Image (cartoon, helix red, strand yellow):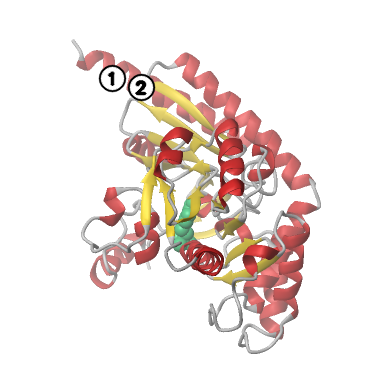
Amino acid sequence: MPTEELKDDAATYLMQTYSRQPISIARGRGAKVYDLEGREYIDFVGGIAVNVLGHGHPDLVQAIQRQAAQLIHTSNLYYTEPQVRLARLLVDHSFADRVFFCNSGAEANEAAIKLARRYGHERHGANRFEVITMKNSFHGRTLGMLTATGQDKVQKGFEPLMPGFTYAPFNDFSALEAMVNDQTAAIMLEPIQAEGGVYVADRDYLRRLREFCTQKDILLIFDEIQTGIGRTGTFFAYEQLGVKPDIMTLAKGLAGGVPIGACLATESVASAFTPGAHASTFGGNPLACAAALAVCRVLLEGRVLDHAKRMGEYLAKGLTDCKDRYRIVTDIRGLGLLQGMEVDADAKTLVADALARGILINAATERVLRFVPPLIISQQEIDKLLELLSTLLNQRQTAGKDSHH
Ligand SMILES: *Cc1c(COP(=O)(O)O)cnc(C)c1O
């Protein structure tokens, strides 16, 4: 089916929840994807920070094929080896002692909030239920998580919102401190606000937050759905930021593209969940867990993480050079292979222009381009992006000058 026909049918049969780029992606290999007509694109979107090993990685493909042939699914009424092994691997490589598996980021955050409420109720009574999240955050699209998300555009039209959430300005400790009261059960934030435009949490802010939460027995929840699994150059972003949360959520990159989510917590927090407290039919299913095991083993073996760290620094430096050369680039922010470029131009038009020239990038906001390629991206592929950005920014800058005269 040619792309034009596919677009027509999509317009007819799908609920119109997405505005899409005008191509259909048919297959992928490494950090490149190919559309239905066979055109090649370098993929700096990576399924939005999902395809950490790129496309068609042999270890991941083989793990999925083997597990599919053996057992795709069974109920959580029974034990399965991939689920238990994955939980152990995540515990061995994080601050956490226990894991709950689900199927998406929003679900992982739902589990985190349920756990925080349970813990709060048990330790401090039924009034301890409030969660403070950040303005400009993103935590998902379920009714609970769109409430947690501190952005009007995500909430609009879906009111009434869920009770028990308030929003603090990001990286502002005094403002947060002033909002805390006896009802505060948890504080939830992303170490890097990715969807919100790539804003990195301050180390000093996080350190004060950690001390404060410990002192008040308020749970600190890190949403590492986008920053986790090597994205920032370490397995988890918190490792570089100098503080450990009480609860952490994962999803996106965890199984390299197979749907999965996870909520991790310390023993004292996790013990608030008892049999029957939470569940998921698909959560931790053998296929997803076998895929996640393959992804995590490749990353923890070391070379890919080191590579991601180096490529992240290389990309950041190249983007910073762009900022030095082009006035319309106003800021570069990020860690590792999660980088944002703020422009004094329409980010969406730049995305369309890049697509037409064979590179997939994404606009996190109207003014911020976000780069989240597979962690196996090569230096040559990054060079191609930087070259293209130079061309496009130069065009924009020149066009901008003309329009002033
Ligand atoms: C993508 C994302 C989510 C939501 O994940 P879904 O799998 O789409 O539900 C939540 N938090 C962060 C930080 C994300 O990047």
Picture coordinates of residue 69 (x, y %)? 69, 83
- Tell me the tag on residue 395: 2
> Residue at 55% of width from left, 43% of height from top?
191
Q: Is mark 2 within 8 Å of ligand 1?
A: no
Query: On the rendered structure, is 16 left or right of 336?
Result: left
Q: Which residue is depicted at the point 60% across and 40% down?
A: 337
What kind of residue is marked 2?
A: Gln
Quarter location, residue 159: bottom left
Total tally of numbered discs in the picture: 2
Q: Amino acid at mark 1?
A: Ala
What's the CA distance linking mark 1 and mark 2? 6 Å
Camera-side residue: 2 or 62? 62
Helix, strand or loop under label 1: helix
Q: Quadrant of the C terminus?
A: top left
Q: Position of residue 98 (x, y in %)?
A: 69, 67
Which residue reaches farthest top? Answer: 405
Residue in the image at 48% along x and 67% along y: 125
Q: Nearer the viewer, residue 44 or 4?
A: 44
Question: Residue 399 — which label?
Answer: 1
Residue depicted at x 32% and y 16%: 398
In this rendering, the answer to whether 291 lies above or below 241 is: below
- Mark 1 and mark 2 residues within 8 Å of each other at the beta carbon: yes
Label 1 crowd (10 A; few <14 / some 14-19 / many >=20): few
The front one of 324 and 111 is 111
Instruction: Report the disc number at residue 97.
Output: none
